[in-house]
Amino acid sequence: MLVYEFKIKSHKHQFSPIDEAIRTGQFIRNKCLRYWMDAPREEKVNRFSLNKYCKVLADNPDYPFVAKLNSMARQSMAERAWASIGRFFENCKKKVPGRKGYPKFNKFSRSVEYKTSGWRISSDKKTLTITDGTGIGKLKLAGSRDLSYYTCAQIKRIRLVRRADGYYAQFCIDIERKESVEFTGKQVGLDVGLNHFYTDSEGNQVENPRYLRKSEKALKRLQKRLSRKHKRGQLQSKRYHKNRVKLGCIHLKISRQRKDHAIKLARCVCQSNDLIAYEDLSVKNMVKNHCLAKSISDVGWTQFREWIEYFGKLFGKQVIAVAPNYTSQDCSSCGQRVKKSLSVRTHICGCGTIIDRDENAARNILDRALQILSGGQKLTLRERRTSAQSKET
């Protein structure tokens, strides 16, 4: 499944119907969630029940705006409600502590989704027309992607997304993407960190860009201006929302920079190596440390891992996640455990190994991945090198 995104270029009077369609979709999603919550125990509510309930909402004279939205768009919002319910049940089965992600009502939705009806695209694939009763009309698409290679039957879903810098249209295309690359025979282990973005098993390091830290001065200035504005009153309201959009644009720029950095690095790593091993970190638990939460969120480890897995599947490379326990403490040469605090950045072992802490962890990560592939046989880095040299001779 490919997702192509285009910027919507249109008249200002067409943006208010898009906002109304987004609010209608949010209303349907919240109503479906309330229907599931209020249903008696003997009544089993599933995704088909929520789809039928969308028809009930459309026929209700108290909600005439619901009928304006396309029927399949209403069903897609019901599917979003059921997806949140399904995640809740999965967490219950896994016995996740806490509230287990109990579904919540949306307050600030930013997108509405159409399936195979309610829209029409021009023959040159440059304009999109929403044909339901919302009154959105024709929208001009601006972007570098070319939709002329795909038929309308391959376009399964269309999303209208509102962001801080404007409105976008996303096309979900049903096609399997595959790229053929030459196999290099190289293997690499990656140890992510805050000082460096990652350190591999060969000693190469990539600096942490720290996009949020670099933009904190501008964010602080705009946040200070925004806090001085008042929401009420005609003049104050205009100034408040103007500064709110500026602040949102900076946050959007930071997220785009972080995403672009993760994509480029992940693609380079997957193209250069046949085996990629990384730590299976629980970032959700790590950000509970209030001292490091901002830095951990800024570096974007989860996003980098997702793109590593995507490009590994795209290029046909092997990607393995290993447990991070004692990767920094164990010696990569002899396997002896040398305990050290986080402030100690050099690994010094009694066997004579003196190496950077992160490089030592990256080698251990690669060793554990190879151990998984070999069926449990543990080989240290020195043993692997001697075995490789003996094979060459």
Image (cartoon, helix red, strand yellow):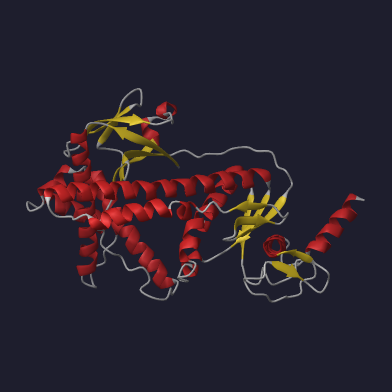
Q: Is residue 125 left or right of residue 117?
A: right
Location of the N terminus by quadrant is top left
- Measured as percent of width and height from the top left, residue 80 is found at 31, 55
Task: Using the rendered image of the protein, determine whether residue 136 is visible from the camera's viewpoint.
Answer: no
| Most foreground residue, 167 or 356 | 356
Q: Position of residue 303 (x, y in %)?
A: 50, 54
Judge whether 194 appears above or below 99 on screen: above
Q: Residue at x 81, y 74 (%)?
A: 350
Q: Position of residue 282 (x, y in %)?
A: 52, 66
Which quadrant of the structure image shows residue 146? top left
Q: Quadrant of residue 69?
A: top left
Residue 390 in view (yes/no): yes
Looking at this view, is 286 or 172 the one in front?
286
Residue 83 sits in quarter = bottom left
Q: Nearer the viewer, residue 286 or 73?
A: 286
Q: Position of residue 58 (x, y in %)?
A: 14, 49
Horizontal side of residue 221 vs 348, given as left or right: left
Side of 221 where 41 appears, left or right: left
Q: Residue at x 33, y 61 (%)?
A: 84
Q: Name the residue nearer the viewer: 172 or 244.
A: 244
Look at 30% across and 65% down and name the residue there. Answer: 103
The residue shown at (32%, 68%) is 102
Q: Is residue 129 left or right of residue 343?
A: left
